[in-house]
Amino acid sequence: MKQNNLDKQVLAALCYQGVIPVEWELLKQPGDAVSQQGYQHDNTVLLQGLLAVDEQPVMEHDEELSSLGHELQRIDHKLNLVLELLSQTLRSWRSLPVPVPVRLTVDGVEWDSGQELPVGEPVLIKLYLSPVFPNPFIASGRVQSSHQGDGCSNSASVCFDDLGGQVRDVLEKVVFRQHRREVARARSARPGGSRSQG
């Protein structure tokens, strides 16, 4: 039981932080099962795509395998370029909201909502996690908190409804990878951060 609680605390500490476009709308009633299943499928495809594009080919020391690795990198670069051009074209057809600061975990999301939201009400939220993929991560949930921050900004947090096991698993991987990257970036930004310790 203690281990289970520790796992939950670790997952809660891991978060995806960024400045991304967010759309939200209050719902008159919680989302139905059919809509949830549709979101789960689309979210799984999106998150798996993010992981695949973000993955770097492994370079081998063997000369033959190394040349294969270089060829895979070249193909990977071309595919990323095609994806970027395609996403730029799609974005030009669709206007996205202004990006705002976001903190995403596997359980929910906190963002600069721009206005106060009624606590406890059902909400549908769309998070545009990557400029490469113009499709959003879509989830329903309930407003957990909403308050005015510094200046005129309002922040809100939403606790997700059941995302489904597969979506949650892939989202954990995306959040962990982005969190690890941010930690590495912060370490390298510190004086002497690029030098090995010990």
Image: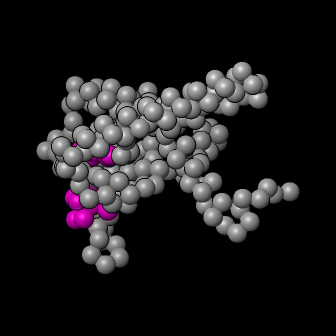
Left or right for 77, reference 96: right
Residue that lies at the very extreme toward the left in this rendered image:
28
> Is 144 in front, or is 168?
168
Q: Residue 147: tell me if it is visible.
A: yes
Tell me which residue sits at (45%, 47%) in the image: 105
Residue 122 colored magenta? Answer: yes
Task: State which quadrant residue 42 falls in.
Answer: top left
Looking at the rendering, the stretch of residues picked out in magenta corresponds to 112-129
Left or right for 106, reference 25: right
- Where residue 141 sits: x, y (%)? 29, 44
Tell me which residue sits at (27%, 75%) in the image: 152
Compared to 155, does 96 lie above or below? above
Task: State which quadrant residue 18 falls in.
Answer: bottom left
- Quarter occupied by the N terminus: top right
- Where residue 51 sits: x, y (%)? 48, 34
Tell me which residue sits at (81%, 57%) in the image: 197
- Where residue 16 sits: x, y (%)? 47, 50
- Where residue 47 sits: x, y (%)? 41, 34
